[in-house]
Image: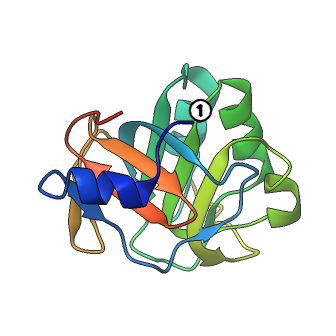
Amino acid sequence: MGFFTADLCDNFSEKTEVLGPDFKFYGGNRKFKGEVITVKLDKNNKDLAALLKNNNGVGKVVVVDVNMRYFAVVGDNLMKFANDNKYEGIIVNGYVRDTITTKEFDIGLLAKGTCPRKYIPVQDGQIGVPLVIDDVEINSGDYIYVDVDGIVVCKEKLV
């Protein structure tokens, strides 16, 4: 995959923003890029699961915000959906679980940490809404580039 986040920041400094350093890798792929689909959740992952299970993910990165509530919203089942539909990766501003298994899937998964519990009562989420994570506004249609140096967000495809 022909990019490095450091080079993107150097070559397109006026077009790039960077998420903070608190994200950790929990998927099998540590370098990926794609067009953003935003998802806003309130603890329960029903709408995220439906998105990953029912939509083609080729060239897409799902960015999920759960306001850092201490419930896991991605685990082995959602990673299987994402893998089956060929998503490039998932970035969670929150927590994940089943991380021994999630690392076996060849897609990216980043989150702020892990939590063994999920939120059982069903709640609706929102897809395609603006998110603000680490003071960076992220919208569906933006582009994300990820490698071991960090997460770069931009409004247009750079490479």
Horizontal side, residue 1 vs residue 62: left or right: right
157 or 97: nearer the eye? 157
Residue 39 picture location, percent across and down: 39, 48
Mark 1 neighbour class, 10 Å CA radius: few under 14, some 14 to 19, many 20 or more: many
Is the residue 157 above or below the residue 93 in the image? above
Which residue sits at x=24%, y=61%? 17
Q: Secondary structure at mark 1?
A: loop
Residue 5 picture location, percent across and down: 42, 56
Is the residue 24 above or below the residue 3 in the image? below
Instruction: Name the colouring of the figure.
Output: rainbow
**Is residue 65 among the parts visible in the rendering?**
no
Horizontal side, residue 159 vs residue 142: left or right: right
Which residue matches tag 1? 87
All told, the count of numbered labels is: 1
Is the residue 17 above or below the residue 87 in the image? below
Q: Quadrant of the N terminus?
A: top right
Residue 113 picture location, percent across and down: 62, 77
95 or 15: nearer the eye? 15
Is the residue 70 above or below the residue 49 in the image? below
Which residue sits at x=48%, y=77%? 69
Q: Quadrant of the C terminus?
A: top left
Residue 105 picture location, percent across and down: 80, 44
Horizontal side, residue 140 vs residue 109: left or right: left
Horizontal side, residue 10 vs residue 80: left or right: left
Which residue sits at x=56%, y=80%? 70
**Is residue 10 among the parts visible in the rendering?**
yes
Type of amino acid at the residue the image marks with label 1: Tyr
